[in-house]
Image: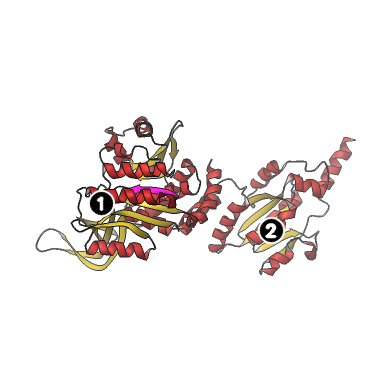
Amino acid sequence: MREFFLENATSVIPSFSNYTLLVVGDLMIDEYLWGRVDRISPEAPVQVVDIENQTYVLGGAGNVVNNLVSLGAKVYVTGVIGQDINGELLHHELKRLGVTTEGLFFDAARRTTKKTRVMAHGQQVLRIDWETRKEVLEGLGDRIINYVRDNVSLFDVVLISDYAKGVLTGKVLKGVIHACHNGKKPVLAGPKGNEFKNYKGATIITANKKEAALASGIPIENEDALIHIGQGFVHELELEAALITRGKEGMTLFMKGKPPVHIKAQVREVYDVSGAGDTVLAVLGLGIASGLSFTHASYLANLAAGIVVSKIGTATTSRDELMDALVQRIAFTTNKVKNLQELKQIVGYLKAQGKRVVFTNGCFDLLHVGHIKLLKESKALGDILIVALDSDDSVRRLKGNGRPIINQYERAKVLAALDCVDYITIFSTDSLCDLLRELSPGVLTKGSNYKKEEVIGREIVEGYGGEVVLIPVAEGISTSEIIGNIVKNQI
């Protein structure tokens, strides 16, 4: 499952720009006042913060938008904001990001939500909220429903980001979910409130443990309670799935008719959990739009959440960051056997770290001391050694019927047991040149029983500035001779 997820995720992340998502919800501005504290006020026993900088980012549903844009998606938005200076700032920022805002409606009597966080020495000292929580006028709610209904065909996935600021009334939620059903589009909801009945019929909901306990009325004191609540959401709300995030305990995915899937948290230093739920909703939505299963999309969302909590403030992640994190997981998994897609990601990551990649290839049927010498001396030429192992069919074509003696999977396991071998890929000799073009290793090695001009792929490697090195072979040792001696001794 893990290897299958990694392979699929590396292929879908670059395709995020192919998808269009709509975000429905409570849009707000997050203001950060950055400063330092070095004294206490003489007027009251409080810290005095000397403000040095002021920044603004999109918050609430806006942070879901920001994450989607950062990940390369095309984004539409619908919601209600005030006709005030913060509303103008929010609208301007959405336009700057290239978000389509025809579904954004203004209410002159409403205050645009702004959350001001005072930060000193990397920590939040104070938060001030400017907001309106009353429900939007029914006519404005109807405009949101109509916008979704009239444009649903444009979207691959619809995301509902509810921060309980009054925009997503029961009527609005019911209307949006109904419009998505009629348009046959997945609708994912990040819910708020004491009960989740208004999200009935959504494709999947994402909630943190505290929200899930509050909505269900059941304290989550053990895993049995968690499972009861999660499965209850799926059944009672007629969902396809529910994802409950659990902080340092990771996430648990509940699906209709399937056992729960527990996903471990990514081990990172946590600086700020602000907006992590927004990132989960955004990446989960993009994963589903890209064709990933609920399980694999949840794994990817979990990885993204681990990235944003290591940043200060309302943060996002990018495709490059997500791919880097994914590649690191692939690179450091205990399984050394990789496919080409995985190796491309690994090699790109390693080269960015300044590592020198060495490449060699062969059949390695009945591993002997000559092979060990070749592999050890190859590894000594760089930092990472990749061994391209001829497939069984390829060995048969090269060596004739009766070969290989050991099948490709067993040969790969034997090579993987060697400390000098970092990665192995199984290939066909016919595709060696393509493999070299894709990976572009710094060094290509072969045994000295070859002449340089006989080495397949030499022109490719030398063409981009790489090096071809012939390793002295151990005289009188070969797999064919070993096999011959075995046959002779049996006669």
Element assignment for label 1: helix
- Residue type at tag 2: Asp
Q: Earlier in the sequence, mark 2 or mark 1?
A: 1
Residue 280 in sight: no
Residue 131 in the image, given as x and y percentages of width and height: 20, 54
Element assignment for label 2: helix
Report whether 326 appears left or right of 224. right
- Residue type at tag 1: Leu
Q: Quadrant of residue 435?
A: bottom right
User: In which quadrant is the C terminus drawn?
Assistant: top right
Residue 27 in the image, given as x and y percentages of width and height: 29, 55
User: In which quadrant is the N terminus drawn?
Assistant: top right
> Which residue is under mark 2?
434
Residue stretch rendered in magenta on the structure: 156-162
Residue at the image point whose x is 29% and y is 61% from the top: 90
Q: Quadrant of residue 62?
A: bottom left
In reply to whether residue 160 is colored magenta, the answer given is yes
Q: Out of 139 and 1, give the one closest to the viewer.
A: 139
Q: Out of 348 and 406, give the one closest to the viewer.
A: 348
Residue 141 in the image, given as x and y percentages of width and height: 27, 49
